[in-house]
Image (cartoon, rainbow, N blue to C red):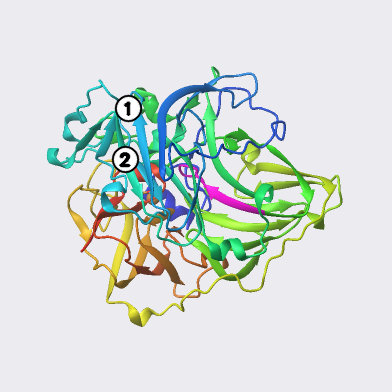
Amino acid sequence: LGGGVLAVAGCGSLGAETAGRKLASTLPLPAPFAVPLPIPAVARPVRPGFYEVVQRPAKVEIVPGTTTEVWGFDGTFPGPTFDLRRGSRTVVRVRNELPVPTSTHLHGGVTPADSDGYPTDLVVAAGRGFRPTGGHSHAGMRVDPDQWTFHSGAREYVYPLEQRAATLWYHDHRMDFTGPQVWRGLAGFLLVRDDEDDALPLPKGDRDIPLMICDRAFDEDGAFRYPSLDPSLLVRAGVDDAYMEGVEGDVILVNGAPWPELEVDAARYRLRLLNASNARRYRLELHPGGRFVQVGSDAGLLAAPVEHDAITMAPAERFDVVVDFSAYPVGSRVTLVNTLGAGPARDVMRFRVARRAADDSAVPARLSRLEPVDRTAAVATRVFDFRKSGQWAGAWTINGKPFTPGTPLVRPRLGTTEVWRLTSDFHHPVHVHLAHFRVLTRNGKAPAATDGGWKDTVDLRPYEVIEVLVRFEGYRGRYMMHCHNLEHEDMAMMADIEVV
Ligand code: C2O
Ligand code: CU
């Protein structure tokens, strides 16, 4: 397997379980577990149903004693958490004060097509011109000039939120530059809540915590380190292999803090895990032992809880889990580790069990009603092959084609269900906008224990075949599917889907 990956991806040190190119920080690494876990601020509406956020640069202290410039929603990284209810139509006005154009996508959101954050539908800071670089993507592909749209200063995104309670997230989606722009901080949570979820006795309030896990590397002056920010690493008609594989850093951040610590009661906690990394995959475990009880997946509650000793998480996946810290003596230190990571990237964060406490939460044996997965309902079966291009320098392709805005690869009908068969040459976390799906099979066998529930992203590994049942509901129009390794996405591994 490793040899095949090497031959295809052209990279020296790639193991079967890692996905990207590791960047080393030149800044001395901070001590682990020295910073308390930050909880992102909750966004406050300007008036009911209407929010305003500003994308702007800000100087923040991530590594203690140093300053890092982030590009953040409201100048924070992560951005504010939108805590919203199912069916509460929400308008978010995004104002761009950054030196670059942006497009904001609500990942997992069921949104009208023109609010989806299409990569060439851009907001440009007021007074700042933008000419697409020669009408080409940096993978060397031509983009039809009339595919670009620009909003000057700000624009509104409409989120009807007619969808189940779920842990969603929003992030930049600019054509060719999603990787560097998310790396600089343009990402945050949007939580959808509903009566069904509220009625369950799961941990609530201070014991319901979103955890955005991502990796970064730092320069000695505290700046984020990223290869495409360094023009010497770009080569003509593409970029070097370091960039091609996907970028990984050696510092693990949770909610924007390096290897933080959270003081917890000896009680159950609901942890909403999000892998917001550009390319890094994680296998999360609790040391010195412990279990995750999964209650939800990308798109909401599971039918019944599933216990895991370890959770493998590809970029953009979410796992909603309950961890019972009353299983540890008061005073214990419980580390969330990444057993795919080497060196400092092996630790993620630590929990310190501080005190005994009352706990009336529970994980019920039944969580939600999920319709049975019925593949006979599918009106079409399609194959999507995720592969490095042999033809276009520096591009990743879907079915041999690099991303071509305005040329849909598939036109599913609204209200129908299809079987999609996904095949690959590498680690490609496959993400579909708008539509949610169920994993039917993995390599001809039953799905993995971590594939359960409704999902929007699936961890497709080298040479695997995954079948998913995709349901097209919501809205007609142009959406997309793509690899959520953000460097692969930027290197053309994307396609239009037109829901008709
Ligand atoms: Cu999370 Cu198209 O992206
Ligand atoms: Cu990929």
Q: Which mark is residue 156?
A: 2
* Residue 245 visible to an observer of this rendering: no
- Find the magenta span and give its range: 270-280
Q: Does the magenta stretch include residue 351?
A: no
**Mark 1 falls on what kind of element?**
loop
Which residue is outermost to the top? 221
Residue 356 in view here? yes
| CA neighbours of label 1 inside 10 A, class few (<14), some (14 to 19), many (20+) | some
Q: Position of residue 107 (x, y in %)?
A: 41, 50
Viewer-closest of 33 and 392: 33
Would you say residue 272 sits in the magenta stretch?
Answer: yes
Q: Is residue 385 left or right of residue 436?
A: left
* Badge 2 element: strand
**In the displayed structure, would residue 236 be above or below residue 462?**
above
Front-lying residue, 360 or 263: 360
Q: Nearer the viewer, mark 1 or mark 2?
A: 2
The CA span between labels 1 and 2 is 18 Å
Report which residue position mark 1 lands on: 100
Type of the residue with mark 1: Val
Judge from the rendering whether residue 174 lies leftward or rightward of residue 464; answer left or right. left
Percent of width and height locating residue 413: 24, 68
- Residue drawn 82% across the image and 51% down it: 357
Percent x, y for residue 200?
Answer: 63, 65
